[in-house]
Amino acid sequence: MVEFSNLKNFIETHYQLDINNIYNLTKKTYRLASDNHDYLLKFASGDDEFIMKQLFAYKVLPSSVLPIYRTKDRMHDVKLDNQFAYLTDYIQVIPVPLEKQVHYYVELLRKLHHETELIVDISEEKLMGIYDIEYKKLQASYAQLQKSIEAFELKLDRSPYEWYFMMVYPILYGVLHRANDELKKFYDLLKKEKKIPTCLIHGDVNVANLLVSERATYLINFEKSEFALSSTDMSQFLKYYHHVPGVQSLILDYVRNEKKPILNHYFFFKALCVDIEALDEAYKNHSLTNIALLNEIIAPNIMAMQIYDEIHKPAPPPEKKNPLKEALNGK
């Protein structure tokens, strides 16, 4: 924590602001009150590259991303005590139910992805690199799933967890089968088009990075932001917030409104791909409690499968003409 007098002198020296009061909010954030405006001073360590990404996001979404103010020397950050500090606006937030927060957050992600989209060329070597990494993850999951089920089938004294795992095995296999189909479609489209739609993703999927005020909503904290496929944000969102009422319809709407099939294929692959190996390693103690934990871990993948099946549901056959009915209706 920085001393009040040192911090006041720091602000006046670098930003030439006359600060009346300083409020310590967290170990790394301070609210600065002047006569007619409140600012937020944030301290960070490590790489300050994210500041340029936040500035880029602010440029395309000035009403939904907070600005970063320049110092008197035209710098966006200043070194202080082995950290760097940057200045933005302080927002007075209002309480909002989680169900509304997730809707606001997805809407801001949608705007960020759309406004920062870049279509870039992709080489055959890069394409194969992406596919190989993802395919190896999928094959490892298949292999571990088969290994687990074969071991459980041979046991005579199965634990309740092992019995339950055998019951959900067909579901897990179906989830991975769909993931495999989506990865293949993703790869085939990439190979055909040799272009990939990237955008600035938020990277830190958490509604804690959403600010809601009386007048607007803001996306904050771009420390993990990078240029990647928008599907990365959305698959993480499903993983963390599948339990919130309304999220399934929210994701379904997002997928239906996505105009680029390649992004939907990658979303479904990421959302469907169960890490069976990590799951089995984490729950070697096959207790009754771990049945509930197993359900919690695979719940996002099950929801992704339900959304997948809804999207790929065949259209109902056209209604057959009924001459008698048409005659009764005067047609």
Image (spheres, helix red, strand yellow):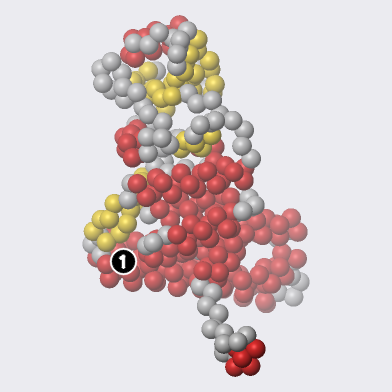
Task: Determine the image quadrant of residue 41.
Answer: top left
Q: 53 or 179, which is in the foreground?
A: 53
Where is 135 relative to 90, above or below?
A: below
x then y, percent, for residue 266: 42, 62
Q: 281 or 203, which is in the foreground?
A: 203
251 on left or right of 222: right
Task: Tell me what residue is drawn at x 45 percent, y 16 percent.
Answer: 37
Where is 6 relative to 319, above or below?
A: above
Task: Tell me what residue is drawn at x 59 percent, y 54 percent.
Answer: 247
Q: 5 or 328, which is in the foreground?
A: 328
Task: Tell me what residue is drawn at x 34 percent, y 23 percent.
Answer: 69
x then y, percent, for residue 27: 52, 22
x then y, percent, for residue 269: 46, 64
Q: Residue reaching furthest front?
A: 330
Task: Determine the image quadrant of residue 302.
Answer: bottom right
Quarter of the picture containing the C terminus is bottom right
Helix, strand or loop at mark 1: helix
Q: 258 or 122, which is in the foreground?
A: 258
Q: Amino acid at mark 1?
A: Leu
Where is 242 relative to 224, above or below?
A: below
Task: Tell me what residue is drawn at x 48 percent, y 13 percent.
Answer: 33
Give the residue pinned by disc 1: 190
